[in-house]
Image (spheres, rainbow, N blue to C red):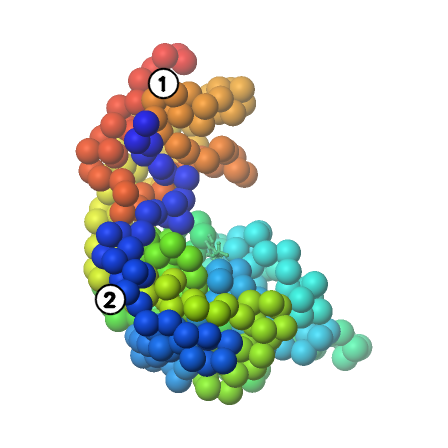
Amino acid sequence: MNYIDLRSDSVTQPTQEMRDAMYTAPVGDDVFGDDPTVKNLEKLCAAKVGKEAGLFVASGTMGNQLAVMAHTVRGDEIIVSSGAHLVQHEASAAVLSGVMVKVLECKDDILTAAIIEKACRPSADGLGPRAGLVCVENALSNGKVMSLAQMKECYDAAKKHGLPVHLDGARLFNAAVALDTDVKQLTQYCDSVMVCLSKGLCAPVGSVLCGSREFIEKARKNRQLMGGGMRQAGLLAACGIIALDRMVDRLKEDHENAKYMAGRLNKMKGVKVLMDNVDINLVFFKVDRPREFIAALPGRMLEKGIKMAGEEGGLLRFITNNDVSRADVEKVCDVFEAIMKESV
Ligand SMILES: Cc1ncc(COP(=O)(O)O)c(C=O)c1O
């Protein structure tokens, strides 16, 4: 069966062009610095985000963690909002970098100058941890996009305290497309940025961490320390180059599909979409049904050829991507509506 998969945008299949590029990519041993395709990808990504250098890494998580490790010293505290991927899904900063994570509750999960300011204050006795890094996410895991003004506000507040800013840009290109701006406009407000190639951009594996040359050399050493050196990684980097060159502009289709889907779902009885959060390709919603019904939803959708994630924190979500067409969206909404009606 050909499933419609709305669990994530990481489920996207690499395009034929990526498979072809993989087949012919010149490669070498990247741990020796010999892989021309990896080098090209790193250079291309750094140029796109306006930083000096890039480092190809196995995952977004590895990119974020290498950033924390390179920016901080053990015992530091990193400042981050509570919904961030770094907090919710990466239990690694304390383990790998020996830092404390100052988890902050903020409206829409967006840090403000006032919140950063408060978090940066030295403890009353001066013996508390030193703030070492501010981490922001754009686009956010909650589906929203931080505006340029919000990014600037965080950056200026961090700089006031001499702190670096790391941007988790797993969906940075989605944010730029949603804001109709160049990514560099966003990345001017960070010292380092991690971008995922393997989400909406459809590459099979990998992320790129970008920053100053000095920062990237530190991260490269630490990538090796973590066993993250990859040999003929050009096979994967070849797909990453296509992801960056060819797959960014089409993200708007995913956004349009998400908005369309959100509109249809929100009209259904018993469904409430978080309409203010549909800035990119993520649609979060609640259904007014008993817990057993909600728990059974993924199984019932699967019977109709649709994959969806289970409820998390009271919310369900659909994520549009390159392998989900407008016709698929219509089918998903029809099936979902029928299931909702049956249950009344
Ligand atoms: C905002 C954000 N940051 C980081 C990551 C981690 O990426 P990876 O799954 O490649 O480790 C994800 C993954 O979904 C994410 O959504």
In the picture of the structure, the residue carrying the numbered disc 1 is 339
Above or below, comparing residue 251 to residue 5 in the picture: below
Which corner quadrant of the image does residue 34 belong to? bottom left
Query: Where in the figure is residue 288, as x and y percent of width and height?
Result: 44, 24
In the picture of the structure, the residue carrying the numbered disc 2 is 245
Position of 331 with respect to 231 (left or right) is left
On-image quarter of the N terminus: top left
- Frontmost of labels 2 and 1 is 2
Query: Mark 2 or mark 1, which has the lower sequence index?
Result: 2
Task: Tell me which amino acid carries mark 2.
Answer: Asp
Residue situated furthest bottom in the rendering? 214
Above or below, comparing residue 327 to residue 339 in the picture: below
The answer to which of 232 and 217 lies nearer the viewer is: 232
Secondary structure beneath label 2: helix
Residue 313 visible from this viewpoint: yes
Query: Where in the figure is residue 3, as x and y percent of width and height?
Result: 33, 32
The answer to which of 22 and 151 lies nearer the viewer is: 22
Residue in view at x 63 percent, y 77 percent:
72
Residue in view at x 38 percent, y 81 percent:
51
Which corner quadrant of the image does residue 201 belong to? bottom left
Residue in view at x 77 percent, y 79 percent:
126
On-image quarter of the C terminus: top left
For label 1, count other residues whose C-alpha is less than 10 Å away and answer few (under 14), some (14-19) or many (20+): some
